[in-house]
Amino acid sequence: MIPGSELPTDLERAPLIIEEERAVEVAPSKVPTTPGEWVRQNLFSSIFNGVVTVLSAAVVLYFGFQLLRWIFVSADWAVVKANLRIYMVGRFPLEEVWRVWASAYLVAFLIGLSWGVSGLRLRWTPRKAALRAVLGVAVLLVLAYLLEGLRIWILTLAIPATVAAGVLLGRAGSRRLRGVVIAGWVLVFPAIIVLLRAFDGVPPQVWGGFMLNVLLAVAATFLSFPVGILLALGRRSTLPIISKFCVGFIELFRGVPLVTLIISGQFILPLMLPPRMQLSLIVRMILVFTIFSSAYVAEIVRGGLQGVHFGQYEAAKAVGLSTTRMMALIILPQALRMTIPAMISHFIGLFKDTSLLAALAITDALRAARRASAQLEFIGDQKEALLAAALLFWVVTFSMSRWSQRLERRLGVGER
Amino acid sequence: MASEMELVGTEVEAGPEQMIEAENVKKWFGNFQALKGVTTTVKRGEVVVILGPSGSGKSTFIRTINRLERHDDGRIVVDGIELTDDIRNIERVRSEIGMVFQSFNLFPHLTVMDNITLAPRNVRRWPKAKGIEKARALLERVGIPEQADKYPAQLSGGQQQRVAIARALAMEPKIMLFDEPTSALDPEMIKEVLDVMKELARSAMTLIVVTHEIGFAKEVGDRVLFFDEGLLIEEGTPDRFFSNPQNDRTKLFLSQIL
């Protein structure tokens, strides 16, 4: 003890404040409660909370009841049922619709195959199983209302069957099929174009419906991803010509409303091209959406690149990697992983933006809804028609966001 | 370290006796002059320890040797190759120099094995099996053969730094640069890294080490360089340097750290 200090010299008799310094605090154990207790603790813990609970329950019940009553009683879904084909494929001629089905099976099979090869398994906790069962029954009920005739039922149910077949085959082949899957995804888009067009097929002017939204979004997504990465890399180039060009490209197309670009693609682009080089409408639209999207992708990737520590560049250079290899093997893999959430958000947005095609006289899913509700016998059924289109978009975007969460979890394993 | 491992990756062929020649090397960061004309020569197989207060330019100097920093004036020749703006020369020099950083800078998205084999496979064009064999031998040498399939984030700092040393050695460099390799480590991990470095120093490898570990300098250093304010102001064998410093600033620095 230091002489003259104010601490008690006899430590054994010094009062120890035990209550305030408990070394190990045990987390309160969760006692399972009965439903009655749970309600009291969570909903009626005070008079104020009780009042809030009762009031909000009343509001929720009222609107919930109104919504359900509208869906099942007041709403007339015949407008959707009668226009199902327009929703899905627009003015695509009936006798050629088999081409769309064939394309759908191709994609379904590829999805199943990728799923099987990647070895992802659904986790079946009782809660999830129940949720999926409810969802499955709901989908079947909707289909039961919409689909009429054995033929269309078989064609529709063949889609999940094709996915399942792909999964089984993918699991059996596992890693050996990896190359096949990648090649499949690269080739699937041209294959679909050929399938729809070739052998006296259907010209792109009459393609439409949700099929067109999906085609356009998928093409623009897969094209704008690499282009955007190149723009982001070009932006950091030490050559002024390249970096200025990339900055100009990005700032120009990011700053212009998409509708402007769509209309330019439709009406101005043909004037700028020589008569022999005219592009079909669908190609022009893919071009427009790719250009627009790659400007955004470039900025997202730039953010990711900035998130990579400079030490990574130095380490890559120090082991002798060339700039190209450094970017491809060290920097981009880390940068792109960080951008997954922003990237998926952007592609979800891009997919929804394909409904801006309605600005032209193209019958995409949204315009199909407007056309359907303009028919004489369905006047006044706008709500139903638009809701159906919204649901179509939501199903796809929601799946995308769930898939991206899986991807993030998977790529995050064991890192950082 | 195990003596039977001693020669893995350190076979050094004969060549000119001067491994590194630096002549009047100058470097500016904006208006700040980090190096004010450094001249020195490092012989093949020599172990050079660089000391100096922070901001003295010692890190900047070794970073100019593999061109992580471009020198603005003067001349640097590494194993007969002069460092200029020619990217081919730079890449040739870099593949002959291994570097170990203060903050390890392992590639976090790759396993330990992939961290080590990446450069030999991509730069030296080794077949996969040869790279893996080499990596296993190196991991054995740095004492962590069981960590090959882990990711860097799953290792301790000392283990990460030893992986970083293995990664640098995988390219079979003629020169190893260490930029304060133990400064970011917890005290109990410094020894394991220093042991690996000492074993390297006793091999035929040319080493340049920026460090504050005086014990390391005394034990295995051939020569000590002392930097202050961008200048090389004193050099000598460790014995002479630590027992009989000539320059006043050297004396002051040593009195503060010893």
Image: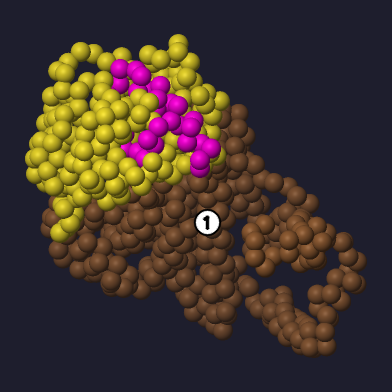
Task: Please tell me which residue lies in front, A190 or A218.
Answer: A218
In the image, is residue A104 above or below residue A358?
above
Residue in front for this viewpoint, B76 or A22: A22
Query: Which chain does yellow denote in the image?
Result: B
Res B8 visible: yes
Query: Was residue A43 drawn as part of the magenta stretch in this picture?
Result: no
> Which residue is pictured at 90% across the width and 72% down the height?
A36
- The residue where tag 1 is placed is A400
- Give the magenta-colored segment's residue range: B186-215
Most common secondary structure along the magenta stretch: helix
Q: Is residue B201 magenta?
A: yes
Query: Looking at the picture, does residue A193 appear above or below residue B173?
Result: below
Graded by Cα atoms within 10 Å as few (under 14), some (14 to 19) or many (20 or more), the crowding at tag 1 reads some
Q: Amino acid at mark 1?
A: Met
* Position of residue B125 in the picture relative to residue A237 (left or right): right
- Foreground of the two, A391 or A78: A391
Q: Which chain is brown?
A: A
Residue B122: quadrant of the picture: top left
